[in-house]
Image (spheres, grey):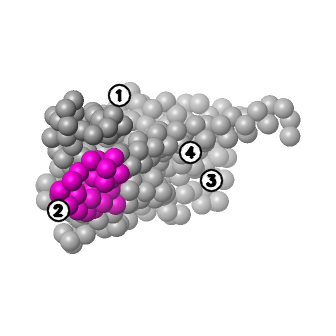
Amino acid sequence: VPPSGRSSVNQACCQRIFSWIPVVIISSVVLWSYYAYVFELCFFTLHNTLEKVTYVLVFHVCFVMFCWTYWKAIFTPPSTPSKKFHLSFSDKERYEMEERPDVQKQILIDIAKKLPIFTRAQSGAIRFCDRCQLIKPDRCHHCSVCETCVLKMDHHCPWVNNCVGFSNYKFFLLFLSYSMLYCVFIAATVFQYFLKFWGELPNDRAKFHVLFLLFVALMFFVSLMFLFGYHCWLVAKNRSTLEAFSAPVFQNGPDRNGFNVGVRKNLTQVFGEDKRLWLFPVFTSQGDGHYFPLRTLCESQNPLLASEGRWGEDGGSDEDSTGKRDTTVAQRVQTVPRSA
Ligand SMILES: [Zn+2]
Ligand SMILES: [Zn+2]
């Protein structure tokens, strides 16, 4: 291995290890809170048996649900576009051999006609991922951390060290909910002992744990509250975080409400039909992540098939919501050397 190659391997390895630090921090805080609550508070401080048993039982329900949803949010791999969105070998060859940008564009348009795609890049070009060599399905974006295209990508979350997208959005929302429940339960039950802090608590160690339990629980609750509120609003509107920042572009231009089919349907899209499973981290989201119902869908026609000319060629800037590394076809066309 050449030295430069070795150092880049080392760097990638370091990055992978460092990326787990936020998860390790959260897990350590949660493990400490378990010890502080169950042992220091319930076993060593409480005298009333009924109170003790109730607290321990309810605490464990919250704790188990929190751990389960956190685990699922971390370890559910992001779903990637299916094979039919990748360029076939012959299409790839045809695309790469072609020197004229217009013809290249047309090749992608022809391939996209066979796919359920309703959104385009800002420029009106087909959304194409250079790195993965695929035509991006609606709501799909390339994650530069995961180095793959992620279906209905919401954001890359360092706290779960994973991409939040179609495969784990429900788990992520439940993780936020149960984290808040966990914090609220701790804060509510610890508060009275916090008031007794200076006087009645038997030992200094318990004082320390009770004090910190309350502060940490309240601190996490307040920060989670804003994030959770924001995601509730996003679910109700059927937008991903990326779409909230940069509206998806449809035939008639950008439309933030393009996938908004009403609060009820938006909710079932993420949580599924069966209400009994809403509160459990099992996958119940509707669809396959490649296609999403549109607010204004004329069932009989695929807008892309209907009138190519209606997609404006002067669609403004080429910014894509995924940032600089996410090249649109238009950008690619500009950068492909003529001699390629
Ligand atoms: Zn990609
Ligand atoms: Zn990612």
Q: Nearer the viewer, residue 186 or 181?
A: 186
The reply to whether the residue tagged 4 has its Cβ within 8 angstroms of ligand 1 is yes
The residue that mark 1 highlights is 316
Could you give the CA–CA distance between mark 1 and mark 4, rounded to whole angstroms?
A: 27 Å
Q: Residue 92, labelled with which disc?
A: 3
Q: Is disc 4 placed on a helix, strand or loop? A: loop
Could you give the CA–CA distance between mark 2 and mark 4, rounded to whole angstroms?
A: 53 Å
Q: Which residue sits at x=59%, y=30%?
A: 335
Q: Nearer the viewer, residue 310 or 237?
A: 237
Residue 217, given in percent of the width and then of the height, sits at 27, 39
Residue 260, given in percent of the width and then of the height, sits at 19, 51
Q: Measured along the vertical axis of the image, is residue 268 above or below residue 123?
A: below
The reply to whether the residue tagged 1 has its Cβ within 8 angstroms of ligand 1 is no
Horizontally, is 160 left or right of 89 in the view? Answer: left
Horizontally, is 262 left or right of 67 in the view? Answer: left
Q: Are marks 2 and 1 in contact (CB under 8 Å)?
A: no
Q: Residue 147, labelled with which disc?
A: 4
